[in-house]
Amino acid sequence: MKTLSSLEIQAVVAELQKYINARVDQIYQPDATEISIALHRSDLGRNFLRIIPGTVLYITTKKRASPKESINFCRFLRKRLGSTRLKEILQKNRERIVELHFEGKESYFILIAEFFSKGNLILCDKNYTIISAFQVQLWKDRKIKAKQKYEYPPERKIDFKDFAEFKSYLESNKKESIVKTIALGLNMGGVYAEELCFRAKIAKETKDPQEKELQELFKQLQMLLSEELHPNRINGEPYPIHMHERGDGEAIESYNKALDEYYAPFMNAAEDEEQEEETEKKKNKWEDMIREQEKQKIQVEKAIEENRIKAEWIYNNYMEAKEILDLFKQKNFTELKKKGVEIEGKNLLIEIQ
């Protein structure tokens, strides 16, 4: 399952602008990895913004099944974001960070979705003070926990004021090949680093590019970053722009839709697995009940047989049984013992031959 690059996040955010001023209808948490925000606008209807920190966010019309008992972070978000409106959605400095700003009558919240490392989802007030987080994360120079000021991670540049700055940055972040320098240094990821090398007509294995090659890379980078969206699919993979290095793709209505179609099988697989687990739990429960009933059945059958033997003995030895009962009523325990009858509280113990 793919993880969105900074360029792909840029495309998603651009398409999500039409949901500005949408009302938050409800918030769901289908499992421990995902938050789904139901957004409603009269001209767009009800849609779901799926956020899987560290992996992806996109809009969908489909809602995943949620547990009957809402998970803690989900309940927390419902209390804060319920009935607010989405006022702004932006990507921070082309990083793999998305901010969603929500405004209520007397409230303002910023939900920050991180898609680098393990990912996270952080709710802040209007001053970027953390209120709560999907996961508490502590680093040497950065803390994600309540009451801390949200600090952005160190920036990896992708926008440059001129060629000189671009060249200097690449030299200071040099890797064993130009494609790795671009992928890691510019935070573009391997796929788009290869595409940039292809467009600049430079071999991706090149270690020390010439001045002309760097100039062409810089030119192609500016063009790529400002390129219009052309959502398409190549060999089942969704892309927001034309991928010349990979060949022609199948055009799709929107990049969000392409992502929705791409991730649907993974979501269905997750739900199938959850359903199988639930089915297995129910199966085990019914098997335990059947075993218990079979055990009770054996005990009942045993009791029936014992009572049948007792009833037959009483029928065949009526006079003797009557005599024993009379002696018991008379509390003639000595005579009862002579007849081999044991007394245990109010019970008479008679050995039946």
Image: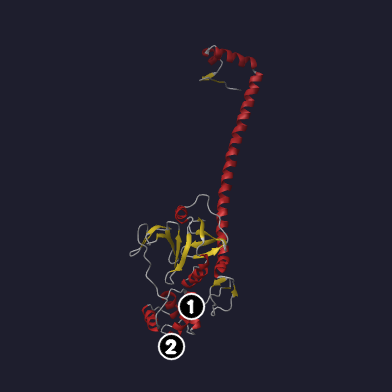
Q: Which mark is residue 320?
A: none
**Residue situated in front as seen by the camera: 2 or 280:** 2
The amino acid sitting under disc 2 is Lys
- State whether residue 270 is above or below residue 158: above
Residue 307 coordinates in the image, percent (x, y): 62, 26
CA neighbours of label 1 inside 10 A, class few (<14), some (14 to 19), many (20+): few
Q: Which residue is mark 1?
A: 226
**Residue situated in front as seen by the camera: 71 or 291:** 71
- Identify which residue is drawn at 56% across, 15% down: 339
Residue 252 coordinates in the image, percent (x, y): 59, 72
**Residue situated in front as seen by the camera: 294 or 157:** 157
Q: As drawn, which residue projects farthest toward the front? A: 105
Residue 169 location, quadrant: bottom left
Q: Earlier in the sequence, mark 2 or mark 1?
A: 2
Residue 2 coordinates in the image, percent (x, y): 51, 68
Asked if disc 2 and disc 1 are in contact, CB closer than 8 Å, the reply is no
Q: Which residue is mark 2?
A: 212
Q: Secondary structure at mark 2?
A: helix
**Residue situated in front as seen by the camera: 203 or 36:** 36
- State whether residue 141 is above or below residue 305: below
- Residue 110 lies left or right of residue 338; in this view the side is left
- Identify which residue is drawn at 47% across, 77% down: 225
- Residue 179 lies left or right of residue 341; in this view the side is left
Q: CA distance from mark 2 to mark 1?
A: 22 Å
Residue 97 coordinates in the image, percent (x, y): 44, 67
The amino acid sitting under disc 1 is Ser
Q: Secondary structure at mark 1?
A: loop
* Quadrant of the rendering where the C terminus is positioned: top right
